[in-house]
Amino acid sequence: MVLGDIDMTGTPIRLSQSPGQLIRIAQQVHTRLWAEHVGAELTAPQYAALIALALEPGADQRTVGERASLDKATMAEMVGRLVRRGLVLRRRDPADGRRKLLTLSPHGEQVMQEASTGVAVVQRELLVPLSEPERSELMMALARMARMENLALETMVDARPLLDAPRVIGYLIRVAQQVHTRLWTELVSTELTAPQHAVLDALSTEPDIDQRTVGERTSLDKATMAELISRLVRRGLVLRRRDPSDGRRNLLALAPAGARLLEEVGGGVTEVQARLLTPLDEIERERALTLLALIARLTVR
């Protein structure tokens, strides 16, 4: 049976089957759907913060950041934006001048409610490939991968319609992606990102393929791919040349330095995937990967 980057005998398998890659692609699907149905005026993390304030009016900034799974610096910058837009009211805690208490403004409540319709569409489309039982199964698996084991389905149901299960899926994907990023930084590298590694991995399997095909293999859009390849070429990790049969195409291959780096980080990459799946038992791992793969297929449109 295949689990992440290793099968049950410990043999490496393709990165495209790994939980980190599948979570990243699911996050990309969510981002695309969000842009289509909610728009660019309110991001998913901002919406999460507004939801947290709707459930806990007057909460301090740190608490809202914890509820929305946002670090201190990100939360401070975001709150500043929301305050300037008139969506959130901020005041000093009279009992502790170091704390900032937040509440939704009437305009913020209106914006949140208006966005909720689009958010529901996003989550519904995200979950189209799954049955109702599979949706709950994936949600709980993601909650545990996101290290949120205390997140109970009953709690979400009590918070409806603001935090029902469908609306929580996108949030859980984002938090699981954050966990993956943290593990990657700790165990792999701060100099090589997961998407960059995916490109090197793809080229190790299919040398001398064109840039567009590599983008398809790694689920990276054209603009991201162009910038990423330029960085890898400048670092001497990837070789790029014009296709002699079509001057418009770039053919890519793994440079010797890229092959060495891929080998050097291999153990860390395997450890990241194993750590990400640690909260799940063997059957849950296989099911979570299967369900994530179904959502990841929505990238093809």
Image: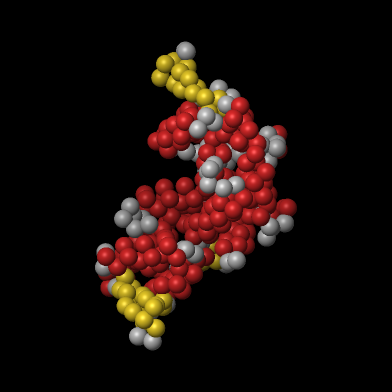
Residue, x 37% and y 50% (percent of image)?
A: 185
The quadrant of the picture occupied by the C terminus is bottom right
Residue 207 visible within the image = no
Q: Residue furthest top?
A: 95
Out of 290 and 250, give the one closest to the viewer: 250
* 255 versus 134 height, above or below: below
Q: Give the image's coloring scheme.
A: secondary structure
* 225 versus 56 height, above or below: below
The quadrant of the picture occupied by the N terminus is bottom right
The spot of residue 195 in percent (x, y) is 42, 60
Residue, x 57% and y 34% (percent of image)?
A: 50
The spot of residue 58 in percent (x, y) is 55, 22
The spot of residue 299 in percent (x, y) is 57, 63
Residue, x 62% and y 41% (percent of image)?
A: 115
Q: Along the horizontal axis of the image, is 261 left or right of 61?
A: left
Out of 10 and 149, give the one closest to the viewer: 149
Residue, x 47% and y 47% (percent of image)?
A: 178
Residue 136 visible within the image = yes
The spot of residue 204 in percent (x, y) is 38, 73
* 32 versus 207 height, above or below: above
Q: Residue furthest right?
A: 132
Out of 126 and 222, give the one closest to the viewer: 222
Out of 121 and 164, give the one closest to the viewer: 121
